[in-house]
Image (tube, grey):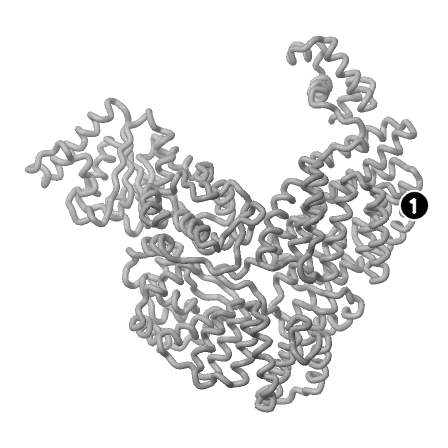
Amino acid sequence: MSHSVLESQLAGGIPEVISNGDFQVSDAALHIRPALVASVTNALRSLEHCGALLIGDHGVGKTFIARQAMEELTGQCLMVSLRGSEATSGIAFGALAPLMGAIEDPQRDNPLAVLRDITRELDRRANGRAVIIFLDNIQFLDTYSAMIVGQLVSNRTARLLLACDSLASAPQEIVGLWRDGMLIRVDVPSFSEEETRQWLRALLQTPISEAATMALWVASRGNPRLLYAVLLEQIEAKTLTKSDGVWVLTGAAFACTGNTADTILASVVSLPAEERQVAEVLALSGGMSIDHLMSFCDPAAVDSLQQRGYLTLSHGESGGAQLAGKLLAEVLAEQVTVGRSRELYQLVTRVAGDNDTSSTSRVAMAVWAIDCGHQLDLEQTLAAARIATNIGRPEQALHILEALHGHAHDFAVGLQQARAHMAMGEMGRSKTIINQLKIRQDKATEAQRLELLLLHSRLPDGTAQGIGDSNTVLEETTRALDGAVPGHGPDDAEVRRLQEQLKLALAERAMHEGRYIEVESKLKELYASDAMLTTKRMAALWLMEICTLTGRIMDANQLAAEIDFYDVIGDEPAGTREHYGSALIGAVTTSLLAAKTGAHKWNESAGMFNRSKETSLEELVYGLNLAYHGCSDKALFALISAASQLDRLGEHGAASLARSAQGYVHALKGESDAAQECLRRGRSVKGTSSRLISIANAYFQVMTVAELDLGEKAIVKLFALADEERRFRTVGVELAFVSSAVRLGNISGAQRLIELADRVQGEQARIFASFARGLLAQDASTLIAAAESALAQGDHILARDVSRAALKIARESLDKVHMRMAQQLIRTSVLSLGRVQPSTEDGQVLTLREQEIAIQAADGASNKAIAAKMHISVRTVEGHLYQVYAKLQVTSRAELRETLA
C-alpha cells in the first residue's frame, strides 16, 4: 500500500476497512470509546450548554468521535462540517468559506454583513431544524472566523462542536465560551494499555500476543493514528508476523520509515521553537533529570510538552524527563543535522548533569557524543558499552566500541565485544573473541582474567574450544575467584562484582538441574550478605521457588513480602499470591518471573520494545494459572498467544509448556483433536529446558491424557512422576502428582496423600487431607466440606473433582441430601470453569429443554402455564419433569427449587 493512498485514507480519521493480504481492518475496532461519544452527544443535546470542545493531541481520534456523535443526531439537526488549516489561517473568514458562497464580494470585508448572510444561509439549509457546526482544527481560525463563530452561538443560531490540539492554542473567543460555561470541555487522551489491547484485537480479528500489543502501545504512545501507521508498517516490514494464527513480534527492531515517520512529524511540526528544542534534546540524550533539563530549557515549554503527552516524568533509577515513545525519539533524532546536534550537545554538557544516572541516559549520551563527533575517553566508552549490554541494547554497545579506533586490540574492549555478541545470541562470534583473548591473558588485569573465565562459562556446552563443558569452566572460575582476595586496589570492586555473578551463575545452574536442596544454604548466605540489591533479589526469588517446591508455602510468602514481590509484578495472575493452586504451578510462576526480572542475564530482548520476552513470560504465567484452575476460555487465549510469541523469541521450553497447558484446556472442553495436536507439539521441545519446566510440561501432558478418557494410563504416569519427586525431596510437587492420581479415582493413594499433605503448608494441603480422609472413610459429608473449601479458595477444578467423589459415594448409599449438595457444587464449579465438557461423573445432565422447564417449575409455574408459554402439550411438560425429577433425585417442586437454588 503506497504512503499516498494510506495518507488519503487517514485524512478523515481512522480508516474503516483496509485489506492488506491477510490483514483485515474491522469496523468494530473503531467503536471502543462509547463514553466519550456519549459525553459529546449529551453536550450537543443539553439545554444548559451550546456544545462541546474536544481537546486532544494530533491523531487521538477527535474527528472520529465528533463524527460518531453527529451520526447519532443525523436527521434531527442540520450538520455543517468546517475545517481550519494553515492555508486558511491568514485569510479573513477563511474557515467559513463554504458558508459564504452567496455573499457578494463587496460585503466580504464587513463582519456584520458576513454574520447576517451566514445566519440567513444556515436558516435556509436547516428548514426549521437545529443547526450543529463541527469545526475541526480551531487553532487555525483567523480572528474574524472566531468572532463569527462566537456570535452564531450567542444569537442561538447554531450549536458548536469544536476540536483542537490544546486549549492554549484555541482562539480567545472560543476559550471565553468555555469559561462562561457555554461549551463543555471533553478531553480525548491517547489509548490506554487496555484500550490498545481491545482496539488491536477488534481490528485484526485474530489473536495478538501481549508482547506485540505492548510493543505497539509503547511505540505509538497510544496515539490511534500513529498506532495504525506503526501496525501497518510492521506488518509490511515483517517485524510483526503471524505464527499459528497469532500476530507476534519477530524480535527485530521496528521499522520506522514512510508513513510512520510522516505521522510522527505531522504531530510535532507545529511545536513552538522552545518546545521543539526540548524534544530534540530529549530525543538525542535519551532523557535527563528534570533539574538538568530546566537549567537550559524554557520551563513553560517543558510543562506544555508534558501536558500534551510528548514528555513523561518518572521516578527511580531511570527517573527524570523522557520523550513518550521510542519511535518519537528516533524520528526526531534523525531530523537533527550534525551541526545542530553538536550545538545541542554543547548546550547540554555546558551545565553539569550530576543527577543524570539513568542507565538509558548514559548510553544515549555516549551514542550522541560519538555521532556528533565528540571524543570520549576509554573509561567512559567502556562503561557506556557495558551498561548498553546490561540493559538489553548490545547493538548500541558495539556501536559505542567502534568509536575506539586506537584501542581495537585492548583486552577490555574485547571483553565488552564478547559480552555484546553473546547478548545478541551470536555465540560463534563471541567464542572467537574469547579464544583470542585467552591467548593474550598476560596483558589483562586480574579482574579481566576472571571476567573472561565467567564469560567462558556462559557459552553453551561444547562451543568453547579447549575449555570443556560449562560446568568445568564454572569450577575453574570458582577456584580463580576464591583465590582473589579483594583489598583496596582499583580492581577490587570489579572482583566483588564478578564473585557475585559467579555465585548467581552457580545457583542458576543448580536450579536448572533441580539441585534445590544442595543450593538452598548458599542462596540463604547470598540473600543475607551485603551483595548488590539485584543479586539479593535473585537469591530471594530462587529461595521462594525452593520453598514452594518443598511445601513451605508460608515461608515463600514471607520472602515475597520482604522483597515486595507482588508490588513489582503488579496485578498478579490468578493464584500467584498464595500459590494455593499447586506447589508446582506456584514454583513455575516464581521461576518464570525470576527469569523475567533477572538483572544478571545478558540476553535481554533487544529492539524497539525491550520487554518482549518478559511480557510473554508474564502472559504464560497468567495462562498457566488459569489453566490449572480450569478457566478454559481465558486460559486458552493467553496460552495460544504466549506459545506463539515465545517460540518466535527462541524460548522453546516455555513455549512447549504453554502448548501442553493449552492441550489440557482443549481436553477440558472436549476438543480431543486439538488436545492431541498440542500433546504432540508439547513433547517436541527444541533445546534444553530446566528440570522444573520439564516437570510442569509433563504434568499438563498427563492431565490432558486423563481428560481424554485414559485415566488408568494417566494414574500410572502420575505415580511415576511422584516417585521421581520424592528422590528430589520436592514434597510440594509430589503432593501435586499424588493428589491428581487420587482425584482420577485411585483411592489406594489416599493414605500417601494424607502423609504428604501433613508435610506441606497452606490451605490447599488441608483440603487434600480432608479429601483423602473422606475417601478412606467413604464419608460424603467430609468430601462436601472439602469441596466447599476448594470452591471458596477459587479452585473450581478441585471442587468439581471432590464433589464428583462425594456424589458417587452418596449415590451408592442412596443419600439424596448429599447427592443434591454434590450436584449443586458440581454445577457451581462447572459454571465457573467456562465451556468445559460435561461428564457422566457429574450426575445426570439435564438437556436444554429440561433445564428450561425445571427452572420454570422451580419458580412455581404450573404445568399448564409452562406448556402455554413453550407452545407444547401439558403431557410433554409432564414427561420432561419426570426425567428432571429422576436425574436430580427430587420428588417435589420444593426439592427442585432447593436443588436449583
In the displayed structure, does residue 282 sit left or right of residue 860?
left
**Residue of label 1:** 748
Residue beneath the point at 72% across and 20% down:
850
Q: Is residue 281 above or below residue 43?
A: below
Image-based side of 765 in relation to 167, left or right? right
Q: Is residue 675 visible?
A: yes
Above or below, 431 relative to 729: below
Residue 541 image offset from top left, x and y in percent: 69, 64
In the rendered view of the protein, which quadrant contains the C terminus?
top right
* Identity of the residue furthest to the left in this view: 106
**Residue visible at 71% across and 36% down?**
670
Seen at 38% across and 42% down, the residue is: 14
Instruction: Look at the image and tell me whether residue 221 can be seen.
Output: no
Amino acid of disc 1: Ser
In terms of depth relative to the viewer, which is nearer, 97 or 527?
Answer: 97
Q: Indicate the position of residue 112 as horizontal and vertical percent values.
A: 13, 36
Which x, y percent locates residue 684?
Answer: 69, 54
Q: Nearer the viewer, residue 693 or 38?
A: 693
Does dot 1 land on a helix, a strand or a loop? helix
Work out whether 470 lies above or below 15.
Answer: below
Disc count in the image?
1
Is 604 left, or right, of 886 in this rendering?
A: left
Q: Nearer the viewer, residue 169 or 696?
A: 696
| Mark 1 crowdedness (10 Å alpha carbons): few <14, some 14-19, many ≥20 | few
Question: Which residue shows up at 76% across the image and 63% down it?
Answer: 546
Snapshot quadrant of residue 513 = bottom right
Residue 536 place in picture, x, y as percent = 66, 70
Above or below residue 306? Residue 627 is above
Indicate the quadrant where residue 102 lies: top left
